[in-house]
Every structure is written in C-alpha cells, then in structure tokens.
Image (spheres, rainbow, N blue to C red):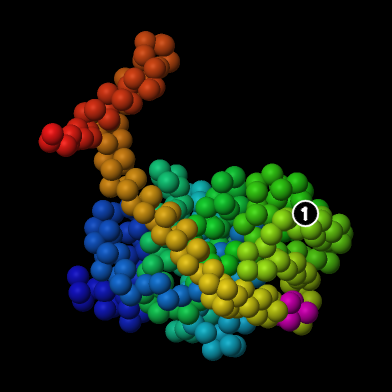
Amino acid sequence: MEDKTRKIREGDIRAVSRLIRNLEDRIPTTDEAIRHLFPFTGKAHIIGITGSPGAGKSTLTDELIYAFRQMGKTVGVMAVDPTSPFSGGAILGDRIRMQRHAEDPGVFVRSLATRGALGGLSKAVGEGIHVLDAMGKDIIIVETVGTGQQEVEIIDHAHTVIVVLVPGMGDEIQAIKAGILEIADIFVINKADREGAGKLFKEIRGSLDMAKNFPGGWRPPILMVESLFETHSFSQSVAELAQKTLDHHQLLIDKDLMGDRKRRKATAEMNEAIRAAVLEPVLDELVSSGRLDEMIQKLVDRASDPYTMAAEVAKQYLAPKKTEEP
Ligand SMILES: Nc1nc2c(ncn2[C@@H]2O[C@H](COP(=O)(O)OP(=O)(O)OP(=O)(O)O)[C@@H](O)[C@H]2O)c(=O)[nH]1
Ligand SMILES: [Mg+2]
C-alpha cells in the first residue's frame, strides 16, 4: 500500500487511472487507498465549473487549462458524468476536446462516471479530488453538469465555483430556481455573442444587487465570454477568468474565509463517510435479504408506516445506548 501511495503521489498515470476507476466502481478497497493518501491532500485550489448540458464547460475548461499552464501551474481536471458510464458521448467528447494537453505531464484529465448511487456524485468526486490533490496538482477543476441538485453539491467540494450560463437557453429562470445564484463565486455568460446576452447580464446583476452581503466583500463578477470561434477574444476572456479564480482564492485566504470552505467540505465528507460506513451496509443487507421489498410492500398496502419500520431497523442495528451507572 505504501508503494501505491508513492506511485500516485508521483503521478503514475496507470496507478491514478486504476484508482479512479475503482472509485467509480465503488470497490471497497479504495477506502484504504484514500486513507493513505489523505495526509498528502489539502493543498490544491479546487475550482468547480457548473452549468447546463452543452453550456460550453468543457470548452472553457480546456482553455482554462491553457491559461493556468501559462502561469506555470499544474492542473488536474475531473469531468463528472452523472448519468451512466455507457452514455459515452460526453466522456468521449471531453477526451477529444482536451487532447491537446495529453502530452503535457503538468496536466491530468479524467472523466468520472458516477452511477446513481446513494449520496450521488459526492463521495466518488470528493475522493477523486483527493487523488488529484495527492498527485500534487496546483489547481483542480471539477466539471459538473447542473441538473437538479448536483450543481448545489459542487459547492461542498470547491473553493471557487464558476457558474456558466448561456443566453437564450432559459438559463435565467433555471438559475434562480436551482439556487445557482447563491453558489456562484464567478458567473460566466458563455457564447456571449448570442442574442440575449445583455438581458442575461442584467438579470444576474439585478439578483446580485438584491443580495444582502457578500462574504469578504467578494461580489461575484460576471464575465462575458464570446464565441469560441473568435479565437483571440475567447482566449483573452478565459485568461481573465483564470485570473479571477486566482483572485477569489487569494481573497479567501486573505479574509480568513478558507476555514469556512474547508469546514463545509469536511462536513460533507464526514457525512458521506458515515453514510457509507453505517447506512449503506444496512441498506445492502435489507436489499439482499428481500426485507426492504417486504417493507415497501407493507407501506403500499398500508399495513405499516415508514416510521415504525425504520424504528425497527434502527433497534436491530444500532447498539442500545449505555445508560450511566447511578
Ligand atoms: N457557437 C458556439 N459554440 C460553442 C461555444 N463554446 C462551445 N461551443 C460548442 O458547444 C458544444 C458543447 O460544448 P461543451 O464544451 O462540450 O459543453 P459542456 O457544457 O461541457 O457540455 P456537457 O459536458 O455535455 O454538459 C460543443 O459542440 C462546442 O463546440 C461558443 O462559444 N460558441
Ligand atoms: Mg462537458
């Protein structure tokens, strides 16, 4: 095990890829691997990039990699595919898109397919971040598709959250509904050459005007990124975006806000670890014994209620609390 940790820390691509694949497959031995890696983590600046499917997150990420490399920083990227490992499209697309960095040892790009497991994206992503962190990457970019709850979970893992919106996709309403405005540290209006960019800008600005306080005085900037095909202005805008994420990170440090973000991340990790250690084994057993099915049927038939049955499970699995000796 010692040896494996060394390989990962030295950035052995095969070892890292194998470990991340095992995280996806939820192979139990990964807990042990992460446990050994843990002391070597906690150094990277973690950036979350989220937005609707097709908003241009991967395209931006590819250019961000370039911008950060220009600044001499090493970069790890994890593109999270929340649907299934067999959807293929997004993963394949990302690989091709970020291919130009394939020969650069300072860059590591990996897709992570999370199967609709309990706790969703969180556990495997959190662990994947630890792996890239232990590899010594200065910056870790986590790309997640904003569908439903997932964009909200990204805030558990990232120090800086970039929210990508596209004009004319109904993103305005979606953003507000999903509570995405609250989680953004930086807004990007992507494909800003499209109609509606100005309107979207005003809407976000309006919502920010209504926000009461900005921790540390950081009012999330709204960056316009023009069409990818306007190569020069695209690169310039993304370089500016890269700089803003570093500014935000610096502010977190200067204003003593890093502790809050770290605590939030630690809270999420702790919850997930307890869930995995305590709840999942119980559920697994209830599923494999067929008892969960029985309970569900009882519920359907109104033969019992969820609280009574859950209390029975708790009584069986949780050790009785010790009472103090008088
Ligand atoms: N017109 C135009 N198309 C763009 C721009 N940026 C990206 N695209 C295209 O939009 C499509 C989606 O881009 P991606 O970068 O894969 O978007 P994504 O948000 O990563 O998509 P998912 O990961 O599938 O959610 C691709 O075909 C890109 O070539 C842009 O600025 N203008
Ligand atoms: Mg993508």
Instruction: Write the residue at 51% across / 48% down.
Output: 83
Residue at position x 12%, y 36% in the image: 325
Task: Point out residue 225 in the picture as x, y percentages from the top left corner.
Answer: 76, 70
Note whether 269 is above or below 135 in the view shown: above
Vertical order, 293 against 155 (above or below): above
Callout 1 amino acid: Met
Residue at disc 1, CB closer than 8 Å to ligand 1: no
**Dominant secondary-structure state across the stretch colored magenta:** helix
Left or right: 21 with respect to 188?
A: left
Res. 18 image quadrant? bottom left
* Secondary structure beneath label 1: helix
Side of 314 relative to 151 (left or right): left
Percent position of residue 290, x then y = 27, 25
60 in relation to 148, above or below:
below
Residue at the spot x=63%, y=69% of the render? 216
Residue drawn at the location 56% of the way across and 64% of the way down: 48
Magenta run includes residue 2: no
Mark 1 = which residue? 210
| Percent x, y of residue 187 | 70, 64
- Relative side of 122 to 245, left or right: left
Camera-side residue of 15 and 172 = 172
Q: Quadrant of residue 50?
A: bottom right
State which quadrant residue 68 falls in: bottom right
Q: Quadrant of the N terminus?
A: bottom left
Question: Residue placed farthest to the left in the image?
Answer: 325
Please indicate, yes or no, whether residue 15 appears anywhere in the rendered image. Answer: no
Position in image of residue 105 (x %, y %):
45, 84
The magenta segment = 233-237
Image quadrant holding the C terminus, namely: top left
